[in-house]
Amino acid sequence: MGALNKGTFVSATKLKNTDNLLTEVSSPKLADWIHRVEQMIQFMTLSGQALTIADKEYEIILHFVPITFGADDAFELRRLEYINDLPTCSITRAKWAKAVQRRKEGQRVASLLLYLNNANAAN
């Protein structure tokens, strides 16, 4: 496993009432290494466990977003990343801050919650 020179595993904690394991690593390089699919498979093989990687999400709110924006459309999210020079797939999901059915008649803009997996992109 050539990535161990990129950092070390700091801690691992089993979360209560689940089979989930929260793992902390010492460097962003090691975290990035684990997230690559082929490395995830190698890590699963070595650990002997089924593994799902859950990124930390950073929530930001955008105000005055046109309601024509497709918050549930992956293409729209990739386009938003491209326009704002964000890393590809750094926006993991988006949702309207207020339910669509609660909008006022004639409303043209709304607040949008964006969830990013990259702290730099969120800033």
Image (cartoon, rainbow, N blue to C red):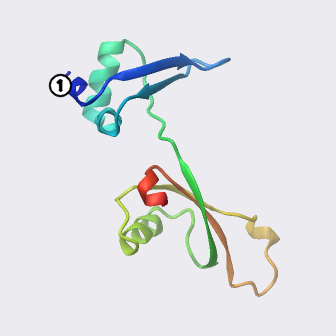
Taking the view exactly as shown, the residue that stands out farthest to the left is: 2
Residue depicted at 75% across the width and 65% down the height:
98
* Residue 80 occupies quadrant: bottom left
Residue depicted at 43% across the width and 59% down the height:
121
Residue depicted at 59% across the width and 79% down the height:
68
Disc 1 secondary structure class: helix
Answer with left or right where residue 19 lies relative to residue 78: right
Q: Is residue 57 above or below residue 64?
A: above
Taking the view exactly as shown, the residue that stands out farthest to the top is: 48
Residue type (three-letter) at the residue carrying disc 1: Gly
Residue depicted at 30% across the width and 16% down the height:
45
Answer with left or right where residue 17 lies relative to residue 20: right
Residue 108: % across, % down = 69, 85
* Most foreground residue, 6 or 84: 6
Q: Which residue is mark 1?
A: 2
Residue 72: % across, % down = 56, 62
Number of disc labels: 1
Residue 55: % across, % down = 47, 40
* Residue 113 occupies quadrant: bottom right
Residue 30: % across, % down = 31, 33
**Quadrant, the N terminus:** top left
Q: Residues within 10 Å of mark 1 (few under 14, many from 20)?
A: few
Q: Is residue 15 above or below residue 84?
A: above
* Residue 17 occupies quadrant: top right
Answer with left or right where residue 122 lies relative to residue 95: left
